[in-house]
Image: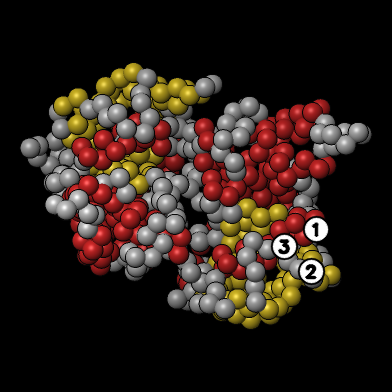
């Protein structure tokens, strides 16, 4: 058994190529026992690909891996977990209609089969209850995962990695965390990292996070990848976030990340959209607000405050109980997705892979899908020429690093988000509802998304931005609405020369 600080897992000259993309090229990484190693880089740098190779999801094209001094070549993810390596994926890897305990032990049920060859579900539930209590996860193991909130599902995945390692008697597992805190509140992030610090005495962690300050605070070392290659290593005790950012993107960190200097504060008096006394039992109550033409209206609050559900209801994804929605000055008789699309309103969900893109369709098809009825030829069929021009235009304008024929699943998170944004802008919208538009993407890609948001607002599009990121909320918004426990607790201006502080807003959230 190796001691703390010795090389625990080693990657040497590992490469991986996908059709048309060299994802990794001769990457070397050493992970020390019981450390928390950060893996940093822009979207497309190869971080998630590297983790999936370690986890047995992908097979490397060349190179070597050693685990505890022995060659490591898992045939699949399940074999990797049985050897002591688990991964918490960026996009949730759960079965919604299965119970919490069933998701925990899925494909490992043989450990709970008794002498009579009957599955001991009671033992599975008791064990899950024990770990939920120990980890502070407030959820019912006997309820379907579909009933869990997003952050509860995220915590469930992280907890599963610990439980499965223990199940196989692995006293020192390697746990890979790909954006584990993307959907968590500040309190939940603190709880998670306190647990990671606690478990690091008997586990080793490799962490991907686009919150650079988070990595600098909690990681022992940070390895940086750029364009699929090693770009260097950072010691958080001796470097700054600015140093890390520069190594990742090859340029200085922008002092005006949110482009406040170009924010347009002179807005039209006319409403693009208004909500009057909206109610949804158990979600929110008596919500009223207006959205001005050419405005970014930010809606913030802690996870579970009702802001996410409000956005869905305004777009017709779910149905509110009472109240009215107005587009311009006209009331919407029945708020449904088709009726809102007809009124030139788009919606971008937080879960882009589940609801924003169709992963196994090409980039081009995803870009033009909302616009197929406006791409008709004179005879009523789809005009291939119009379609081609639209695809080329928006791949270029949004700097999407992909070709029209590339499958969306092969794109980085940042480029996938650009596709989601571009497909709605191509539809020539008047209003866009964004739910956490930069969740799970790196700082470089965030700046590009912010630039695109500023650009479309200048062209007259109005934006409702729902976000868990407080700095994003402050930096981008013209006005800010804060929600707590389903109610609006504060509304205030956020002009470029009148931005509120985090402290001023947090008091209305907690």
Q: In which quarter of the view is residue 495 placed?
A: bottom right
Please state the total of marks drawn on the protein image.
Answer: 3
Q: Is residue 420 visible?
A: yes
Q: Residue at x 64, y 61 (%)?
A: 317
Vertical placement of 38 versus 306: above or below?
above
Q: How many residues crowd mark 2 within 10 Å: few (<14), some (14–19), many (20+)?
A: some
Q: Which image quadrant for residue 315?
A: bottom right
Q: Residue at x 59, y 62 (%)?
A: 466
Structural distance between the alpha carbons of marks 1 and 3? 11 Å
Residue at the limit of the structure toward the right, as seen here: 378
The quarter holding residue 54 reads top left
Q: Is residue 287 left or right of residue 342?
A: left
Q: Report whether 39 appears left or right of 503.
A: left
The disc placed on residue 336 is 3
Chain-order first, disc 2 or disc 1: 2
Instruction: Count residues near mark 1 (Cα–Cα under 10 Å), then give few for <14, some for 14-19, many for 20+.
Output: some
Identify the residue at horizontal 29%, vertical 38% (top origin). 78
Of helix, strand and loop, which one carries label 2?
loop
Q: Nearer the viewer, mark 2 or mark 3?
A: 3
Give how far across and how far down residue 92 sits, in percent: 43, 49
Instruction: Say if 304 sits above or below 46 in the image.
Output: below
163 or 143: nearer the viewer = 143
Disc 2 target residue: 332
> Do the residues under discs 2 and 3 have CB atoms within 8 angstroms?
no
Q: Residue at x 52, y 22 (%)?
A: 19
Q: Is residue 437 left or right of residue 387?
A: left
Q: CA distance from mark 2 to mark 3?
A: 9 Å
The residue under label 1 is: 343
Residue 499 on image: x %, y % = 59, 65
Q: Position of residue 9 (x, y in %)?
A: 22, 33
| Badge 3: residue crowd in 10 Å (few <14, some 14–19, many ≥20) | some
- Asked whether 310 or 190 is in front, the reply is 310
């Amino acid at each position: 058994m190796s001691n703390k600080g010795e090389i625990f897992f080693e990657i040497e000259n590992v490469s991986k190529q996908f059709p048309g993309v060299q994802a990794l090229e001769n990457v070397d990484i050493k992970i020390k026992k019981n450390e928390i190693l950060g893996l940093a880089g822009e979207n497309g740098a190869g971080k998630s690909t590297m983790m999936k190779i370690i986890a047995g999801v992908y097979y490397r094209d060349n190179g070597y891996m050693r685990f505890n001094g022995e060659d490591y070549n898992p045939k699949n993810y399940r074999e990797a977990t049985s050897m002591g390596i688990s991964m918490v994926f960026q996009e949730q890897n759960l079965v919604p209609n299965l119970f919490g305990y069933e998701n925990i032990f899925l494909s490992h049920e043989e450990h709970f089969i008794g002498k009579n060859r009957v599955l001991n579900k009671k033992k599975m539930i008791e064990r899950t209850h024990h770990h939920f209590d120990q980890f502070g996860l407030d959820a019912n193991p006997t309820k379907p995962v579909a009933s869990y909130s997003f952050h509860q599902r995220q915590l469930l995945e992280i907890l599963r990695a610990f439980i499965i390692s223990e199940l196989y008697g692995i006293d020192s597992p390697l746990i890979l965390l790909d954006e584990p805190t993307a959907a968590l509140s500040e309190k939940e992030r603190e709880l998670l990292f306190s647990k990671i610090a606690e478990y690091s005495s008997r586990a080793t962690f490799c962490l991907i996070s686009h919150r650079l300050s988070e990595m600098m605070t909690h990681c022992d070392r940070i390895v940086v990848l750029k364009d699929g290659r090693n770009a260097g290593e950072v010691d958080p005790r001796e470097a700054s976030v600015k140093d890390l950012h520069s190594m990742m993107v090859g340029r200085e960190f922008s002092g005006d990340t949110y482009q406040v200097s170009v924010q347009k504060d002179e807005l039209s008096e006319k409403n693009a959209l208004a909500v009057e006394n909206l109610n949804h039992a158990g979600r929110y109550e008596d919500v009223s607000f207006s959205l001005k033409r050419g405005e970014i209206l930010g809606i913030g609050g802690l996870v579970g405050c009702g802001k996410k559900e409000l956005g869905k209801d305004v777009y017709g994804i779910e149905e509110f109980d009472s109240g009215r929605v107005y587009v311009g000055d006209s009331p919407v008789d029945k708020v449904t997705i088709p009726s809102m699309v007809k009124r030139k309103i788009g919606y971008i969900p937080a879960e882009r892979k589940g609801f924003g893109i169709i992963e196994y369709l090409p980039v081009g098809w995803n870009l033009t899908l909302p616009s197929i009825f406006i791409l008709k030829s004179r005879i009523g069929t789809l005009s291939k020429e119009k379609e081609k021009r639209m695809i080329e235009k928006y791949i270029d304008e949004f700097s999407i690093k992909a070709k029209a024929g590339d499958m969306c699943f092969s794109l980085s998170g940042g480029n996938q988000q650009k596709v989601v944004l571009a497909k709605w802008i191509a539809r020539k919208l008047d209003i866009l509802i964004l739910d956490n538009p930069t969740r799970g993407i790196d700082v470089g890609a965030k700046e590009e998304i912010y630039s695109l948001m500023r650009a479309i607002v200048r062209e007259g599009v109005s934006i409702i931005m729902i976000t868990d990121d407080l700095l994003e909320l402050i930096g981008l918004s013209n006005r800010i609405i804060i929600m707590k426990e389903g109610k609006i607790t504060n509304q205030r201006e956020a002009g470029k020369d009148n931005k509120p502080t985090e402290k001023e807003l947090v008091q209305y959230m907690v």
